[in-house]
Image: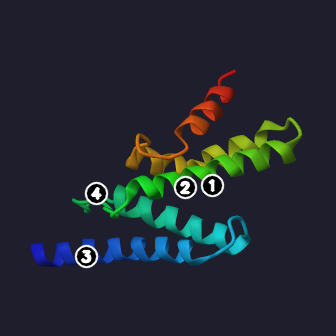
Amino acid sequence: MRVSTMASITGREDVVRNAWETFLTIDTMRNEDKMSALDAFLVKFLHVNVDPTTTSGFNYRDMDGVSSVVTRHFLADIHDICISSEGDDSKLMAYLVTGRGGNILRVLNSTGVSGITCNVELANQIGRAHV
């Protein structure tokens, strides 16, 4: 039974890894296909890491790189929402609570942020949210 469980975990990790690789192969930074691929990766990553039957979680070879890329998209999304919402915080709240932003925050909570390359920008953005 243990071998079956490990094969199942490895299979789920492969699904996440493939979703990440698919996301990376889309050239443009912010188009609909790229954002859909990011959303798919986030959902799959969270499923593997939150699933109580998973003992190892997703262990990609460069989690700092994953966290950095995801954080850059998070910051760009927040920037775009703030520009387009003209003071209406409901779009930003929806993004942070139920949208991609909430999933990104859950992924960052899982992976940690100590190794991200844009930690100053993230700290500044979070600091502005508390003002």
Q: What element carries label 1?
A: helix
Q: Is residue 16 visible?
A: yes
The quarter in which the C terminus is drawn is: top right
Q: In this view, does 59 lie above or below 101?
A: below
The quarter in which the N terminus is drawn is: bottom left
Which mark is first along the chain, 3 or 2?
A: 3
x, y percent for residue 57: 29, 60
Q: Distance between the residues labelled 1 and 3?
A: 30 Å
- The residue at which mark 4 appears reads as 52
Seen at 28% across and 57% down, the residue is 52
Which mark is first along the chain, 3 or 4?
A: 3
Q: Which amino acid does label 3 sit on?
A: Ser
Q: Distance between the residues labelled 4 and 3?
A: 13 Å
- The residue at which mark 3 appears reads as 8
x, y percent for residue 43: 50, 63
Q: Nearer the viewer, mark 2 or mark 3?
A: 2
Left or right: 115 in relation to 118: left
Res. 70 mark: 2
Q: Distance between the residues labelled 2 and 4?
A: 24 Å
